[in-house]
Amino acid sequence: MTMKKFIILMFSSVLGLFACNKPSQAQVEEWIQNGDQYHRNEYYTVAFDWYMKAAKAGSAVGQRRVGMMYGGGIGIKQSYKKAFKWSMKAAEQGDVDAQMMVGLSYNNGYGVTRDDTKAIVWLKKAAEQEQAHAQYLIGNIYASGGVGVNQDYNESLKWYRKAALNGDADAQDALGQMYCQGCGVEVDYAEAMRWWHKAAEQGHAEAQYNLAVMYNNGEVVEKNPIEAFKWHMKAAEQGVIDSQICVAEAYESGYGVEANAEMAFKWFMEAAKHGSAEGQAKVANMYFEGQGVGKDQEAAIHWIKLYEKNPNK
Protein backbone atom coordinates (compact mmCIF):
# COMPACT_ATOMS: atom_id res chain seq x y z
CA MET A 1 0.00 0.00 0.00
CA THR A 2 1.37 3.41 -0.93
CA MET A 3 1.77 6.14 1.69
CA LYS A 4 -0.88 8.26 -0.08
CA LYS A 5 -3.46 5.42 0.04
CA PHE A 6 -2.61 4.78 3.71
CA ILE A 7 -3.22 8.44 4.59
CA ILE A 8 -6.53 8.42 2.71
CA LEU A 9 -7.74 5.31 4.55
CA MET A 10 -6.56 6.58 7.92
CA PHE A 11 -8.33 9.91 7.67
CA SER A 12 -11.46 8.36 6.22
CA SER A 13 -11.64 6.37 9.46
CA VAL A 14 -11.06 9.48 11.53
CA LEU A 15 -13.89 11.25 9.73
CA GLY A 16 -16.24 8.44 10.75
CA LEU A 17 -15.65 9.18 14.42
CA PHE A 18 -17.48 12.50 14.04
CA ALA A 19 -20.62 10.97 12.54
CA CYS A 20 -22.57 10.46 15.77
CA ASN A 21 -22.05 13.85 17.42
CA LYS A 22 -23.29 17.27 16.40
CA PRO A 23 -20.13 19.28 15.67
CA SER A 24 -19.32 22.63 17.17
CA GLN A 25 -18.57 25.63 14.96
CA ALA A 26 -14.91 25.27 15.90
CA GLN A 27 -14.93 21.65 14.73
CA VAL A 28 -16.52 22.58 11.41
CA GLU A 29 -13.95 25.32 10.85
CA GLU A 30 -11.21 22.80 11.64
CA TRP A 31 -12.63 20.41 9.04
CA ILE A 32 -12.50 23.19 6.45
CA GLN A 33 -8.91 23.95 7.39
CA ASN A 34 -8.04 20.25 7.12
CA GLY A 35 -9.65 20.13 3.69
CA ASP A 36 -7.70 23.20 2.60
CA GLN A 37 -4.44 21.68 3.82
CA TYR A 38 -4.97 18.37 2.01
CA HIS A 39 -6.13 20.21 -1.11
CA ARG A 40 -2.92 22.26 -1.14
CA ASN A 41 -0.91 19.05 -0.80
CA GLU A 42 -2.94 17.45 -3.63
CA TYR A 43 -4.60 14.79 -1.48
CA TYR A 44 -7.85 15.68 -3.20
CA THR A 45 -9.90 12.67 -2.10
CA VAL A 46 -9.13 13.35 1.55
CA ALA A 47 -9.78 17.06 1.05
CA PHE A 48 -13.16 16.27 -0.50
CA ASP A 49 -14.11 14.08 2.48
CA TRP A 50 -13.32 16.87 4.95
CA TYR A 51 -15.26 19.42 2.91
CA MET A 52 -18.23 17.07 2.61
CA LYS A 53 -18.23 16.55 6.37
CA ALA A 54 -18.38 20.32 6.86
CA ALA A 55 -20.99 20.67 4.13
CA LYS A 56 -23.30 18.13 5.73
CA ALA A 57 -22.92 19.99 9.02
CA GLY A 58 -24.33 23.07 7.27
CA SER A 59 -21.14 24.99 6.50
CA ALA A 60 -21.65 27.28 3.49
CA VAL A 61 -17.91 27.27 2.82
CA GLY A 62 -17.87 23.46 2.91
CA GLN A 63 -20.88 23.30 0.59
CA ARG A 64 -19.23 25.69 -1.86
CA ARG A 65 -15.97 23.71 -1.78
CA VAL A 66 -17.87 20.47 -2.43
CA GLY A 67 -19.68 22.12 -5.33
CA MET A 68 -16.40 23.29 -6.82
CA MET A 69 -14.83 19.84 -6.54
CA TYR A 70 -17.83 18.15 -8.13
CA GLY A 71 -17.77 20.74 -10.90
CA GLY A 72 -14.10 20.21 -11.63
CA GLY A 73 -14.03 16.47 -10.97
CA ILE A 74 -11.35 17.02 -8.34
CA GLY A 75 -11.08 14.18 -5.81
CA ILE A 76 -14.49 12.89 -6.92
CA LYS A 77 -16.20 11.92 -10.18
CA GLN A 78 -17.36 15.05 -11.99
CA SER A 79 -21.06 15.79 -11.66
CA TYR A 80 -22.50 19.15 -12.67
CA LYS A 81 -25.83 18.25 -11.08
CA LYS A 82 -24.19 17.61 -7.71
CA ALA A 83 -22.02 20.69 -8.17
CA PHE A 84 -25.16 22.77 -8.69
CA LYS A 85 -26.94 21.14 -5.72
CA TRP A 86 -24.16 21.96 -3.24
CA SER A 87 -23.45 25.39 -4.68
CA MET A 88 -27.14 26.24 -4.32
CA LYS A 89 -27.11 25.18 -0.66
CA ALA A 90 -24.21 27.58 -0.03
CA ALA A 91 -25.77 30.32 -2.14
CA GLU A 92 -29.02 30.16 -0.19
CA GLN A 93 -26.97 30.86 2.94
CA GLY A 94 -25.62 34.03 1.35
CA ASP A 95 -22.19 32.77 0.27
CA VAL A 96 -21.23 35.32 -2.38
CA ASP A 97 -18.93 33.09 -4.43
CA ALA A 98 -21.53 30.30 -4.41
CA GLN A 99 -24.14 32.76 -5.63
CA MET A 100 -21.88 33.57 -8.56
CA MET A 101 -21.38 29.84 -9.22
CA VAL A 102 -25.14 29.25 -9.25
CA GLY A 103 -25.59 32.15 -11.66
CA LEU A 104 -22.84 30.78 -13.90
CA SER A 105 -24.49 27.34 -13.83
CA TYR A 106 -27.81 28.80 -14.97
CA ASN A 107 -26.02 30.84 -17.65
CA ASN A 108 -24.23 27.82 -19.10
CA GLY A 109 -26.75 25.08 -18.32
CA TYR A 110 -24.31 23.22 -16.07
CA GLY A 111 -26.30 20.72 -13.99
CA VAL A 112 -29.52 22.65 -14.54
CA THR A 113 -31.66 23.84 -17.47
CA ARG A 114 -30.17 27.01 -18.90
CA ASP A 115 -32.10 30.09 -17.82
CA ASP A 116 -30.40 33.48 -18.10
CA THR A 117 -33.20 35.21 -16.20
CA LYS A 118 -32.38 33.05 -13.16
CA ALA A 119 -28.68 33.48 -13.87
CA ILE A 120 -29.05 37.24 -13.54
CA VAL A 121 -31.07 36.88 -10.30
CA TRP A 122 -28.25 34.93 -8.65
CA LEU A 123 -25.44 36.94 -10.18
CA LYS A 124 -27.06 40.14 -8.93
CA LYS A 125 -27.13 38.72 -5.38
CA ALA A 126 -23.36 38.37 -5.62
CA ALA A 127 -22.93 41.63 -7.53
CA GLU A 128 -24.76 43.56 -4.81
CA GLN A 129 -22.05 42.35 -2.43
CA GLU A 130 -19.47 43.87 -4.82
CA GLN A 131 -18.39 40.53 -6.30
CA ALA A 132 -16.67 42.04 -9.33
CA HIS A 133 -16.64 38.97 -11.54
CA ALA A 134 -20.36 38.45 -11.01
CA GLN A 135 -20.86 42.02 -12.20
CA TYR A 136 -18.78 41.21 -15.28
CA LEU A 137 -20.83 38.08 -15.98
CA ILE A 138 -24.06 40.09 -15.84
CA GLY A 139 -22.53 42.47 -18.37
CA ASN A 140 -21.73 39.50 -20.61
CA ILE A 141 -25.32 38.24 -20.57
CA TYR A 142 -26.70 41.65 -21.51
CA ALA A 143 -24.02 42.16 -24.16
CA SER A 144 -25.06 39.10 -26.15
CA GLY A 145 -28.58 38.42 -24.92
CA GLY A 146 -29.60 34.99 -23.76
CA VAL A 147 -32.38 32.64 -22.75
CA GLY A 148 -35.11 34.96 -21.47
CA VAL A 149 -32.88 38.05 -21.62
CA ASN A 150 -32.79 40.59 -24.47
CA GLN A 151 -29.56 42.16 -25.64
CA ASP A 152 -29.09 45.51 -23.96
CA TYR A 153 -25.80 47.36 -24.47
CA ASN A 154 -26.69 50.06 -21.95
CA GLU A 155 -27.19 47.48 -19.19
CA SER A 156 -24.08 45.65 -20.32
CA LEU A 157 -22.03 48.82 -20.18
CA LYS A 158 -23.37 49.62 -16.70
CA TRP A 159 -22.34 46.24 -15.27
CA TYR A 160 -19.01 46.12 -17.09
CA ARG A 161 -18.20 49.53 -15.63
CA LYS A 162 -19.09 48.43 -12.10
CA ALA A 163 -16.86 45.38 -12.42
CA ALA A 164 -14.05 47.31 -14.09
CA LEU A 165 -14.02 49.92 -11.33
CA ASN A 166 -13.81 47.04 -8.86
CA GLY A 167 -10.68 45.84 -10.63
CA ASP A 168 -11.96 42.91 -12.71
CA ALA A 169 -9.53 42.55 -15.63
CA ASP A 170 -12.04 40.74 -17.86
CA ALA A 171 -14.49 43.62 -17.39
CA GLN A 172 -11.79 46.20 -18.09
CA ASP A 173 -10.96 44.44 -21.36
CA ALA A 174 -14.68 44.17 -22.24
CA LEU A 175 -15.24 47.84 -21.47
CA GLY A 176 -12.36 48.68 -23.79
CA GLN A 177 -14.07 46.64 -26.50
CA MET A 178 -17.34 48.52 -25.95
CA TYR A 179 -15.62 51.88 -26.41
CA CYS A 180 -13.67 50.60 -29.41
CA GLN A 181 -16.77 49.27 -31.17
CA GLY A 182 -19.26 51.91 -30.01
CA CYS A 183 -21.59 49.46 -28.27
CA GLY A 184 -23.90 51.43 -25.98
CA VAL A 185 -21.51 54.37 -26.04
CA GLU A 186 -19.82 56.73 -28.52
CA VAL A 187 -16.69 55.29 -30.12
CA ASP A 188 -13.74 56.50 -28.06
CA TYR A 189 -10.42 54.83 -28.84
CA ALA A 190 -8.55 56.75 -26.17
CA GLU A 191 -10.98 55.48 -23.54
CA ALA A 192 -10.68 51.98 -24.97
CA MET A 193 -6.92 52.16 -24.58
CA ARG A 194 -7.23 53.45 -21.02
CA TRP A 195 -9.24 50.39 -19.99
CA TRP A 196 -7.06 48.00 -21.97
CA HIS A 197 -4.03 49.38 -20.17
CA LYS A 198 -5.63 48.64 -16.82
CA ALA A 199 -6.47 45.08 -17.86
CA ALA A 200 -3.11 44.51 -19.56
CA GLU A 201 -1.22 45.60 -16.48
CA GLN A 202 -3.09 42.87 -14.59
CA GLY A 203 -1.86 40.31 -17.12
CA HIS A 204 -4.97 40.08 -19.32
CA ALA A 205 -3.69 38.55 -22.55
CA GLU A 206 -6.36 39.84 -24.93
CA ALA A 207 -6.01 43.37 -23.58
CA GLN A 208 -2.24 43.11 -24.08
CA TYR A 209 -2.83 42.11 -27.69
CA ASN A 210 -5.30 44.96 -28.22
CA LEU A 211 -2.82 47.49 -26.85
CA ALA A 212 -0.06 46.14 -29.08
CA VAL A 213 -2.29 46.56 -32.14
CA MET A 214 -3.07 50.17 -31.19
CA TYR A 215 0.60 51.02 -30.72
CA ASN A 216 1.45 49.28 -33.98
CA ASN A 217 -1.25 51.06 -36.01
CA GLY A 218 -0.56 54.49 -34.56
CA GLU A 219 -4.10 55.72 -35.21
CA VAL A 220 -4.95 56.74 -31.63
CA VAL A 221 -1.50 57.17 -30.14
CA GLU A 222 1.77 57.82 -31.87
CA LYS A 223 3.06 54.68 -33.57
CA ASN A 224 5.52 52.99 -31.22
CA PRO A 225 7.09 49.73 -32.48
CA ILE A 226 8.94 49.15 -29.20
CA GLU A 227 5.78 49.46 -27.12
CA ALA A 228 3.88 47.33 -29.63
CA PHE A 229 6.53 44.62 -29.39
CA LYS A 230 6.48 44.75 -25.58
CA TRP A 231 2.75 44.09 -25.36
CA HIS A 232 2.76 41.52 -28.16
CA MET A 233 5.48 39.63 -26.30
CA LYS A 234 3.47 39.61 -23.08
CA ALA A 235 0.42 38.28 -24.93
CA ALA A 236 2.52 35.79 -26.92
CA GLU A 237 3.93 34.34 -23.73
CA GLN A 238 0.34 33.67 -22.62
CA GLY A 239 -0.46 31.80 -25.83
CA VAL A 240 -2.14 34.45 -28.00
CA ILE A 241 -1.38 33.08 -31.46
CA ASP A 242 -1.72 36.39 -33.35
CA SER A 243 0.79 37.95 -30.97
CA GLN A 244 3.17 35.01 -31.42
CA ILE A 245 3.11 35.67 -35.17
CA CYS A 246 3.67 39.40 -34.61
CA VAL A 247 6.61 38.74 -32.28
CA ALA A 248 8.13 36.36 -34.84
CA GLU A 249 7.72 38.93 -37.62
CA ALA A 250 9.27 41.63 -35.43
CA TYR A 251 12.33 39.46 -34.80
CA GLU A 252 12.47 38.59 -38.50
CA SER A 253 12.38 42.22 -39.66
CA GLY A 254 13.93 44.02 -36.70
CA TYR A 255 10.76 46.05 -36.16
CA GLY A 256 10.68 47.24 -32.54
CA VAL A 257 13.43 44.81 -31.52
CA GLU A 258 16.85 43.76 -32.77
CA ALA A 259 16.54 41.29 -35.65
CA ASN A 260 17.16 37.71 -34.57
CA ALA A 261 16.43 34.83 -36.96
CA GLU A 262 16.64 32.18 -34.24
CA MET A 263 14.05 34.00 -32.12
CA ALA A 264 11.87 34.52 -35.19
CA PHE A 265 11.94 30.76 -35.81
CA LYS A 266 11.14 30.05 -32.16
CA TRP A 267 7.99 32.17 -32.21
CA PHE A 268 6.83 31.02 -35.64
CA MET A 269 7.20 27.48 -34.27
CA GLU A 270 5.14 28.36 -31.17
CA ALA A 271 2.35 29.63 -33.38
CA ALA A 272 2.66 26.64 -35.70
CA LYS A 273 2.31 24.19 -32.80
CA HIS A 274 -0.88 25.95 -31.78
CA GLY A 275 -2.40 25.45 -35.24
CA SER A 276 -1.49 28.69 -37.02
CA ALA A 277 -1.41 28.08 -40.77
CA GLU A 278 0.82 31.12 -41.22
CA GLY A 279 3.20 29.80 -38.58
CA GLN A 280 3.30 26.35 -40.19
CA ALA A 281 4.09 27.83 -43.61
CA LYS A 282 6.87 30.02 -42.16
CA VAL A 283 8.40 27.14 -40.19
CA ALA A 284 8.45 24.98 -43.33
CA ASN A 285 10.12 27.75 -45.33
CA MET A 286 12.71 28.43 -42.61
CA TYR A 287 13.62 24.73 -42.52
CA PHE A 288 14.00 24.75 -46.33
CA GLU A 289 16.12 27.91 -46.27
CA GLY A 290 18.04 27.16 -43.10
CA GLN A 291 16.93 30.51 -41.72
CA GLY A 292 17.18 30.68 -37.93
CA VAL A 293 17.49 26.88 -37.84
CA GLY A 294 19.57 24.23 -39.59
CA LYS A 295 18.34 23.12 -43.00
CA ASP A 296 16.09 20.09 -42.67
CA GLN A 297 14.12 19.05 -45.75
CA GLU A 298 12.27 16.27 -43.91
CA ALA A 299 11.06 18.70 -41.23
CA ALA A 300 10.11 21.23 -43.90
CA ILE A 301 7.97 18.66 -45.71
CA HIS A 302 6.32 17.70 -42.40
CA TRP A 303 5.23 21.29 -41.73
CA ILE A 304 4.15 21.91 -45.33
CA LYS A 305 1.86 18.87 -45.08
CA LEU A 306 0.36 20.23 -41.86
CA TYR A 307 -0.13 23.59 -43.54
CA GLU A 308 -1.87 22.00 -46.53
CA LYS A 309 -4.29 20.14 -44.21
CA ASN A 310 -4.96 23.19 -42.07
CA PRO A 311 -8.59 24.29 -42.57
CA ASN A 312 -7.72 27.84 -41.47
CA LYS A 313 -5.15 28.62 -44.15
Image (cartoon, rainbow, N blue to C red):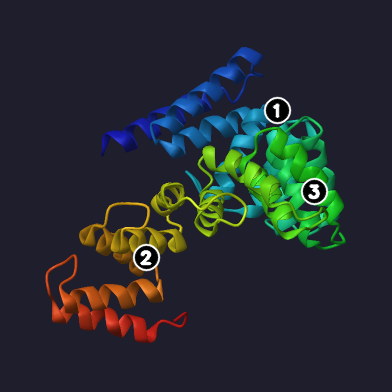
- Residue at image coords 76%, 55%: 187
- Between 234 and 66, the residue placed more toward the observer is 234
Mark number displayed over residue 50: none
Q: Which of the two discs, 1 and 3, labels the residue nearer the N terminus?
A: 1
Check if mark 1's residue and mark 3's residue have beta carbons within 8 Å.
Answer: no
- Mark 1 and mark 2 in contact? Answer it, CB < 8 Å: no
Give the residue number, with chain letter if any, for mark 2. 271
What secondary structure is marked by label 1?
loop
Which residue is located at x 27 percent, y 33 percent? 3
Given the image, on which type of amino acid does mark 2 rest?
A: Ala
Q: Residue at x 52, y 22 (%)?
A: 33
Q: How many marks?
A: 3
Question: Disc 1 marks which amino acid?
Answer: Gly
Q: CA distance from mark 3 to mark 2?
A: 34 Å
Residue position marked by numbered label 3 in the rendering? 157
**Residue 126: where, in percent of width, then height?**
77, 36
- Considering depth in this image, is 23 or 100 the residue closer to the camera? 100
For badge 3, the amino acid type reads Leu
Badge 1 crowding class, 10 Å Cα cut-off, few under 14, some 14 to 19, many 20 or more, is some
For the C terminus, the image quarter is: bottom left
Q: Nearer the viewer, mark 1 or mark 2?
A: 2
Label disc, if present, on residue 58 of the rendered structure: 1
Mark with earlier residue (3, 2): 3
Q: Earlier in the sequence, mark 1 or mark 2?
A: 1
Query: Label 1 to label 3, Cα distance in Å?
Result: 38 Å
Q: Nearer the viewer, residue 53 or 150?
A: 150
Does the rendering let one see residue 255? yes
- Judged left or right of residue 260, residue 12 is right
